[in-house]
Image (cartoon, rainbow, N blue to C red):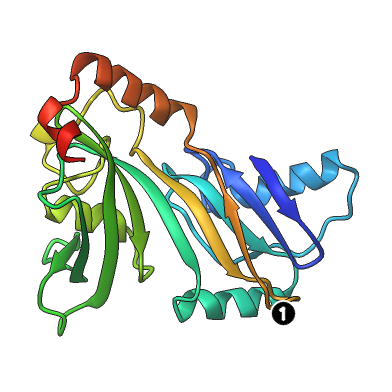
Amino acid sequence: MNVIYEDNALMVLEKAAGVLSQPVKDDPRESVVELIRYYWKSQKARQQYIGIVQRLDMETSGVLVVAKNKVAQRVLQQQFATHQIGKRYLAITSNIPNQRKGRLVGSITRDKSGKRVVLQDSAKGKEAATRYKVIDEFGNNALLEVAPETGRTHQIRLQLSRINCAIVGEPLYVSSTKKQKRATRCMLHAWKLSFLHPDTCKRVEFESPMPEDMKKYIESMKIEQPANPANEENA
């Protein structure tokens, strides 16, 4: 865990892949909450309130904000609920979208087996909307900038899988024959986060650079699957 910013109202940090956003009962793995407590202890700082307002999947890395008092927590939760939070992710996908940029709209619900699915019928489930654009292409893979407009569980993973562009390393929403075994995890990174500061009401933005495992994956794929010259001309 790397602390990007901290003041009396909140803490902004970079969460590593494999770390839980918050503790899970009977799960021995460390979470952001424990790591914050360790951090304050190492800094000989007073232990304070830790208010979770945002969650990233365990395998997702990137920028995360945590409230340090209940007022800040309520303010940030309200911004998430009303979609005032600006979020940008980086995703490496197993295919290239047909369009270089677009908006994915659907409804997330569960099928008979209990698995989350995306439907076009907005009357069923919860509405989900995600914008994306292609940043780079290498072989059959693409690097996307993704901006979720809503905050549904597994939204980005589900909606990209639905257009046959599953995130590399995706463990749930892709058939086993399409899983990329070389990926160490689901290649999704919370890149940028912006919000209105609870104390100043001014918009602030924080960024977490692409992690090394994603950089190395892209580099290895570019060596094995050089970009199509025609794609470069059209970019």
Residue 23 visible to an observer of this rendering: no
Asked which quadrant contains residue 76, the reply is: bottom right
* Label 1: element kind: helix
- The location of residue 113, given as percent across then percent down, is 14, 61
Front residue of 98/183: it is 98
**Total of numbered circles in the picture?**
1
- 177 relative position to 73: left or right: left
- 73 relative position to 111: left or right: right
- The location of residue 217, given as percent across then percent down, is 34, 24
- The location of residue 99, given as percent across then percent down, is 14, 52
Q: Which amino acid does label 1 sit on?
A: Val
Front residue of 188/220: it is 220
Residue 86 visible to an observer of this rendering: yes
Vertical order, 176 against 119 (above or below): above
The residue under label 1 is 71
Around disc 1, counting alpha carbons within 10 Å, would you say few (fewer than 14), some (14 to 19), or many (20 or more)?
some
Vertical order, 143 against 224 (above or below): below
Asked which quadrant contains residue 221, the reply is: top left
Quarter of the picture containing the C terminus is top left
Residue furthest bottom in the image:
123
Q: Residue at x 74, y 76 (%)?
A: 200
Q: Which residue is drawn at 27% across and 52% down?
A: 133
Q: Residue at x 91, y 44 (%)?
A: 44
